[in-house]
Image (spheres, grey):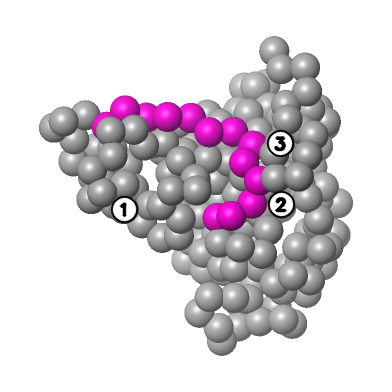
């Protein structure tokens, strides 16, 4: 069983999906801790209600990055709870290289678009406004770029002619809830092999 740490900033729907998949036996993992840069994040409440250690750690004065000292507090908390894989779930901060090196190739993120298209914020809106026929979600390793790391899993969502941005976003979110736990399980089972930028899934079911 792998111990994961989940970093959150908002409502925590992907966190809840991970919790639900663990409880149902679909994901063989334990959440060591949940950390948020937002003391009012609903995700913290969801974690506590499920008996998961949950912490607010002030991000510092920056708007995009964690302050260096605060980032060390995040790392200390993750290590304290013996976390082996860090999962970003709506975490609205960019991590410094020191953090990335501390958990090298052990940080993953979920993004509501088919990367490398529509990186950054409001990806669903970007796709909707662009007029794509196929949208989707991506789980990827985190590197120093924004939504630029090697891709683990992608799943497509068809854009309907009468879609609204809200309807499309809801369908993408359902896919996110499925593939994030799938990616964590693949990592836990050591089925992910990195070859350059490509991630090969070893012995897929």
Q: Is residue 176 left or right of residue 73?
A: left
Q: Is residue 65 above or below residue 27?
A: below
User: Which residue is under mark 3?
Assistant: 199
From the viewer's side, name the closer residue of 184 and 54.
184
Horizontal and vertical percent position of residue 162? 13, 32
Residue 10, x across and y down, in percent: 46, 58
- Seen as rendered, the residue at the extreme left is 162
- Dot 2 falls on a residue whose secondary structure is strand
Q: Report which residue position mark 1 lands on.
A: 126
* Marks 3 and 2, the one that precedes in the sequence: 2
Magenta span: chief secondary structure: strand
Q: Is residue 120 magenta?
A: no
SS class, disc 1: helix
Q: Earlier in the sequence, mark 1 or mark 2?
A: 2
Residue drawn 18% across the image and 41% down it: 164
From where the camera sits, is residue 43 visible? Answer: no
Q: Secondary structure at mark 3?
A: strand
Q: Quadrant of residue 74?
A: bottom right
Distance (Cα) linking label 3 and label 1: 26 Å
Task: Return the mark for residue 107.
Answer: 2
Q: Which residues are magenta?
A: 147-159
Q: CB of mark 3 within 8 Å of CB of mark 2?
A: no
């Amino acid at each position: 069983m792998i111990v994961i740490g989940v970093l959150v900033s908002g409502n925590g729907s992907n966190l809840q999906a991970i919790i639900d998949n663990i409880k149902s036996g679909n994901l063989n993992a334990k959440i060591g801790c949940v950390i948020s840069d937002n003391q009012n994040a609903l995700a913290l409440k969801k974690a506590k209600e499920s008996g998961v250690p949950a912490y607010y750690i002030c991000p510092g004065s920056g708007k995009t990055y964690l302050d260096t000292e605060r980032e060390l507090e995040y790392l200390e908390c993750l290590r304290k709870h013996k976390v082996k894989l860090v999962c970003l779930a709506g975490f609205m901060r960019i991590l410094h290289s020191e953090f990335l090196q501390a958990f090298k190739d052990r940080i993953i993120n979920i993004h509501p678009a088919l990367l490398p298209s529509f990186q950054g914020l409001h990806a669903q809106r970007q796709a909707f406004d662009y007029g794509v026929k196929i949208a989707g979600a991506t789980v990827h390793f985190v590197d120093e770029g924004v939504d630029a790391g090697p891709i683990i899993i992608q799943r497509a969502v068809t854009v309907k002619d009468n879609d609204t941005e809200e309807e499309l976003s809801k369908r993408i979110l359902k896919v996110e809830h499925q593939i994030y736990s799938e990616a964590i399980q693949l990592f836990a089972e050591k089925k992910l092999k990195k070859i350059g930028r490509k991630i090969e899934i070893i012995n897929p079911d």
